Every structure is written in C-alpha cells, then in structure tokens.
Image: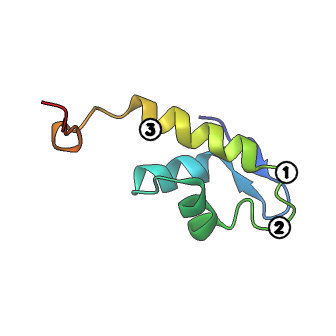
Amino acid sequence: MSRSLVCICNMVTENEISSALKKGARSTRDIQHITRAGTSCGRCLVVIDSLVEEYLAKLPEDPQQRIDFQN
C-alpha cells in the first residue's frame, strides 16, 4: 500500500485505511467510523469500497463461515 491520499477532505491515506483493515474493519462503514474517510463529500467511497474488497479477497477463507445448507 502506498501513502497516497484517499480522502482529501479528511486527509486519510491508503496506509491508514490498510491499518484499519488489519485491525478488524470489514466494511466501508467500518472504515468511515474508524478513520472518518468518506464522511464529508463522499467522492472517495468508490476507492474505499475497492480497498476493502481487495483486502477481504486476500484473507484466507474461514471454514466455519462456509455453511452449506443444501446437503
């Protein structure tokens, strides 16, 4: 991750969002609550959504979260 600004309004960098994700944030709403990114004009919400999706896609799958009710 880089140091680039994601949220100009609240001066939140990509590193700060990454840190929030590593500490347990799992949604854009979590990122907004922790960092205030995306809570002013909202232009950065698409970028935050993307960062959250990328991070979650890299996490190992938790076998207890995968429940198959079809069988």
Crowding near the residue tagged with mark 1, few <14, some 14–19, many ≥20 C-alpha atoms within 10 Å:
some
The Cα–Cα distance between marks 1 and 3, rounded to whole angstroms, is 22 Å
Q: In what element is the residue under mark 1?
A: loop
**The one of 51 and 14 positioned closer to us in this rendering:** 51
Q: Residue at x 74, y 50 (%)?
A: 45
Tag shown at residue 1: none
Q: Earlier in the sequence, mark 1 or mark 3?
A: 1
Crowding near the residue tagged with mark 2, few <14, some 14–19, many ≥20 C-alpha atoms within 10 Å:
few
Q: Earlier in the sequence, mark 3 or mark 2?
A: 2
Q: Is residue 45 left or right of residue 40?
A: left
Occupied quadrant, residue 35 = bottom right
What residue is shown with label 1?
A: 43
What residue is shown with label 3?
A: 56
Q: Is residue 10 left or right of residue 2?
A: right
What residue is shown with label 2?
A: 40
Amino acid type at mark 3: Leu
Q: Are marks 1 and 3 in contact (CB under 8 Å)?
A: no
Question: Split into 4 quadrants, where in the image is the C terminus?
Answer: top left
Crowding near the residue tagged with mark 3, few <14, some 14–19, many ≥20 C-alpha atoms within 10 Å:
some
Q: In what element is the residue under mark 3?
A: helix
Percent across and percent down for residue 16 are 60, 53
Q: In what element is the residue under mark 2?
A: loop
Q: Is residue 38 left or right of residue 50?
A: right
Amino acid type at mark 1: Arg
Percent across and percent down for residue 29 are 59, 61
Figure check: 40 above or below 59: below
Occupied quadrant, residue 40 = bottom right
Q: Residue at x 60, y 39 (%)?
A: 51
Amino acid type at mark 2: Ser
Question: Split into 4 quadrants, where in the image is the N terminus?
Answer: top right
The Cα–Cα distance between marks 1 and 2, rounded to whole angstroms, is 8 Å
Q: Residue at x 52, y 53 (%)?
A: 27
